[in-house]
């Protein structure tokens, strides 16, 4: 089968670049399958939960499988059986189980770390045999202990980050516990980034630093787009393909959305309020939606933001600064933006709002790398437009505040009633001062 990487102009849209790379990766994997390579089985295992333009069938590993009565399965045969039992758990006959047990017994009699030719140094054999051991764990628990000792031995030093990550994945399979993926920031290789993401996104792994997931996703996609698929093996292509499909399916909108889109969406607030319900009293059952406090502004912003960004966090709690706790109205962690809403009841409130935001911005951004920018949204009930420009320019001078949007109350809404005032005590009810005698 011939293989050619599709040519795409450098100025092509992101969607076209991703689509071309997905096609190239699928072709490369299909090529390995056509050749009957064991790598095709590992690629199938990696992509088991993804819909791809690749045909998988039960005969994929036939060339490696021993016939009944032949010598026990070697490392390749055991790996094939491990992949097949994992992928087709209900289709393996009892003869396969017998061959599996005998093959594992024979394999454990050898030292796979004696040289660099043993199965721990071959990705497809390593994962396939690990799956075989897991399949036989009930009948042969000693095989699980043996393989774990091999993989955690000081003598086993995987030659690259890719195999090191696969080793962590296989140990997690044996332990039935998630593999802890350490700091991924030093990783630069596309395959290693995609492998770390594949493990951490599945049930067999997790990132030690949960807030690193978004950064890992961004760096993985960037690396995938720069990689020449024709130079990679099928498992490595499968990992890149898994990352590309997953990112496209779940958050392609977030890849291109940024702070400017937050501003664009929120600037449409006033125009959208044209349909805000405030019926005439002449109607039989008039409906009115008053906006009388900050919490109602937050409700409207939630509807607007959630319709565009799927990761909106309501009342995002941030790390403490000294004795003070901080809670922003909304967080958009994928683009590292906080949205803070304020309600100005009267013109004098603008000075107070400026002071509050200036103080809060220090706590919002200084002690966390989860967020880098703040977008301020102010709803002006008093329609004091003469204060808007001054407040906006003052807040934009604050480090970290990237946008300030101030909107006025729609004219169709009745003005909000003033907040109830505490009654003043009458002179008769006040305690009288007594003169010393």
Image: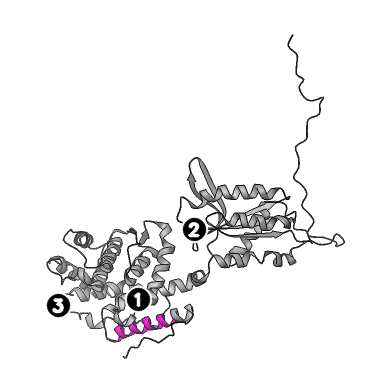
**Residue 303 lies in the magenta stretch:** no
| Mark 1: secondary structure | helix
Q: Residue furthest right?
A: 282
Per the picture, the main secondary structure of the magenta-coloured stretch is helix
| Mark 3: secondary structure | loop
What residue is rendered at 64% in x and 49% in y?
353
Q: Which residue is mark 1?
A: 238
Q: Is residue 27 above or below residue 290?
A: below
Residue 324 horizontal/vertical position (percent):
52, 42
| Mark 2: secondary structure | loop
Q: Is residue 154 visible?
A: yes
Q: Which residue is mark 3?
A: 71
Q: Earlier in the sequence, mark 2 or mark 1?
A: 1
Do tag 3 and tag 1 residues touch (Cβ < 8 Å)? Answer: no
Q: CA distance from mark 2 to mark 3?
A: 62 Å
* Circle 2 crowding by C-alpha within 10 Å: few under 14, some 14–19, many from 20: some
Q: Earlier in the sequence, mark 3 or mark 1?
A: 3
Q: Earlier in the sequence, mark 2 or mark 3?
A: 3
Image position of 384 (left or right of 141): right
Question: Which residues fall within the magenta stretch?
Answer: 19-37
Q: CA distance from mark 2 to mark 1?
A: 34 Å
Q: Nearer the viewer, residue 426 or 66?
A: 426
Mark sitting on residue 372: 2
Which one is in front in this view, the residue at disc 2 or the one at disc 1? 2
């Amino acid at each position: 089968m011939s293989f050619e990487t599709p040519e795409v102009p450098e100025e092509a849209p992101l969607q076209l670049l991703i689509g071309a790379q997905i096609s190239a990766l699928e072709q490369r994997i299909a090529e390995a399958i056509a050749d009957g390579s064991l790598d095709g089985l590992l690629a199938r295992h990696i992509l088991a939960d993804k819909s791809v333009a690749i045909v998988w069938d039960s005969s994929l590993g036939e060339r490696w499988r021993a016939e009944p009565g032949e010598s026990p399965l070697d490392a390749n045969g055991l790996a094939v059986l491990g992949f097949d039992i994992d992928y087709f758990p209900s289709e393996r006959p009892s003869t396969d189980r017998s061959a599996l047990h005998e093959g594992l017994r024979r394999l454990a009699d050898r030292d796979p770390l004696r040289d660099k030719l043993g199965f721990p140094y071959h990705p497809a054999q390593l994962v396939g045999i690990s799956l075989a051991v897991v399949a036989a764990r009930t009948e042969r628990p000693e095989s699980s202990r043996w393989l774990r000792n091999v993989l955690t031995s000081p003598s086993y030093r995987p030659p690259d980050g890719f195999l090191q990550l696969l080793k962590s994945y296989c140990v997690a399979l044996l332990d039935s516990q998630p593999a802890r993926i350490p700091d991924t920031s030093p990783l630069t290789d596309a395959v290693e980034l995609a492998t770390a993401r594949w493990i951490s996104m599945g049930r067999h792994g997790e990132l030690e630093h949960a807030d690193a997931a978004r950064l890992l996703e961004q760096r993985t996609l960037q690396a995938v787009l720069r990689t020449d698929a024709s130079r990679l093996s099928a498992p490595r292509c499968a990992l890149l393909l898994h990352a590309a499909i997953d990112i496209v399916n779940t958050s392609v909108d977030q890849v291109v959305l940024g702070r400017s889109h937050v501003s664009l969406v929120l600037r449409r607030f006033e125009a959208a309020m044209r349909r805000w319900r405030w019926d005439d009293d002449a109607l039989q059952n008039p409906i009115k939606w008053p906006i009388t406090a900050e919490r109602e502004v937050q409700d409207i912003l939630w509807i607007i933001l959630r319709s565009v960004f799927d990761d909106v966090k309501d009342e995002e709690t941030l790390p403490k600064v000294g004795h003070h706790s901080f809670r922003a109205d909304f967080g958009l962690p994928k683009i590292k933006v906080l949205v803070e809403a304020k309600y100005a009841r009267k013109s004098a409130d603008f000075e107070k709002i400026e002071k509050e935001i200036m103080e809060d911005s220090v706590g919002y951004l200084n002690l966390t790398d989860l967020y880098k920018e703040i977008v301020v949204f102010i709803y002006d009930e008093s329609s004091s437009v003469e204060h808007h420009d001054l407040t906006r320019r003052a807040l934009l001078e604050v480090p970290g505040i990237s946008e300030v949007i101030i909107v006025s109350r729609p004219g169709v809404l009745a003005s909000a009633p003033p907040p109830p005032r505490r009654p003043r005590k009458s002179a008769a009810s006040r305690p009288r001062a007594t003169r010393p005698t």
